[in-house]
Image (spheres, helix red, strand yellow):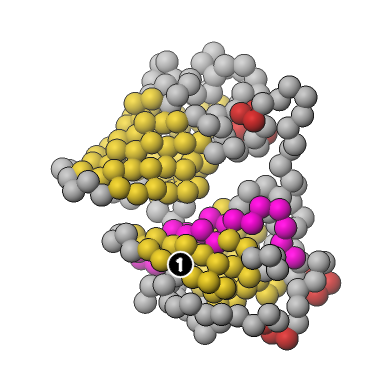
Amino acid sequence: MAVLAAGCILLPSQAGGQDIDDTDESGTALLRSDRVWKVVEAVGNERWEATWTLRSDGKTFDAHWVHLPGGDSGHLRAFARVTSLRGQNIVVERPGLGSYTGVISADRTRIRGRMSWSAGTWDVRLEPGALPGGSPPPPASGRQSPATAGDSRSSPGKGSGGGPAHVSLAGHKWQVVESSGSERWTAEWTLRSDGRSFDGTWTHTPGGDKGSLTNFARIVSISGNQIKIERPGLGTYTGVISADRRRIQGKNSWSGATWIVSSTGAPLPETIR
């Protein structure tokens, strides 16, 4: 059964007979700030990449999903609802199917857990400040430009190839090719405002299939000439950075495909942790 394509279920306005309050006193908190969750569900070699969008009630979701491999996609309306948010634990009910349970990271920008109806994993990426108790993203002020207003973790500091301190990678575009046998994926990856996460567009040859992905990968670390990028629900890219810090060569962990970044748009910093 397709995890995200299990049907459109309209929810009552008060699931479980109790509305969600603005505080944890009722067991949940009304979600505010960024209303878009980037979600990956994985079961075996199948994956569903989705965008969940909170409705105005701050607890009910609509969604758009893509199933891989295969590329099937669809929309769901009011298909899930937050029913419990206590500390680092969250429960999202999927009426007629079951529930998602997860543990929220210390910085409250990620949820990892499972679905009750399968042995699959549930992985959610969130912008800073999306969940109660998290730190909101720093506001731009003074002469700070949007390109330098990202997560402090994306400010790598000085390095011989990394440019001045506090320069974010946000907005940089990477030209990427992945090759496995006779197959090739040619892509452009764009770094998001946090300077670590990527959106992307890709073309597959032979065949010419095309697509796009949102918040699909994140830089885990850069140390000297070594880089590691995580692809939640799938694996990791590891690579070696060139001397001019503008190119990368490596492989992905799930297929051993060659991964080549021919241009990163600007020199990469020497350290990101």
Which picture quadrant has residue 174? top left
Is 31 contained in the magenta span? Answer: yes
Residue at image coords 42%, 15%: 244
Q: Is residue 169 above or below residue 46?
A: above
Q: Position of residue 163 (x, y in %)?
A: 57, 16
Q: Closer to the camera, 142 or 116?
A: 142
Q: Is residue 198 above or below residue 102?
A: above
Q: Is residue 264 left or right of residue 195?
A: left
Q: Position of residue 48 (x, y in %)?
A: 41, 62
Q: Position of residue 131 (x, y in %)?
A: 70, 57
Figure quadrant of the C terminus: top right
Q: Position of residue 67 (x, y in %)?
A: 36, 62
Highlighted magenta segment, given as a residue range: 30-52
Question: In this figure, what is the number of numbered marks?
Answer: 1
Is 168 contained in the magenta span? Answer: no
Which picture quadrant has residue 54? bottom right
Identify which amino acid the numbered label 1 is placed on.
His
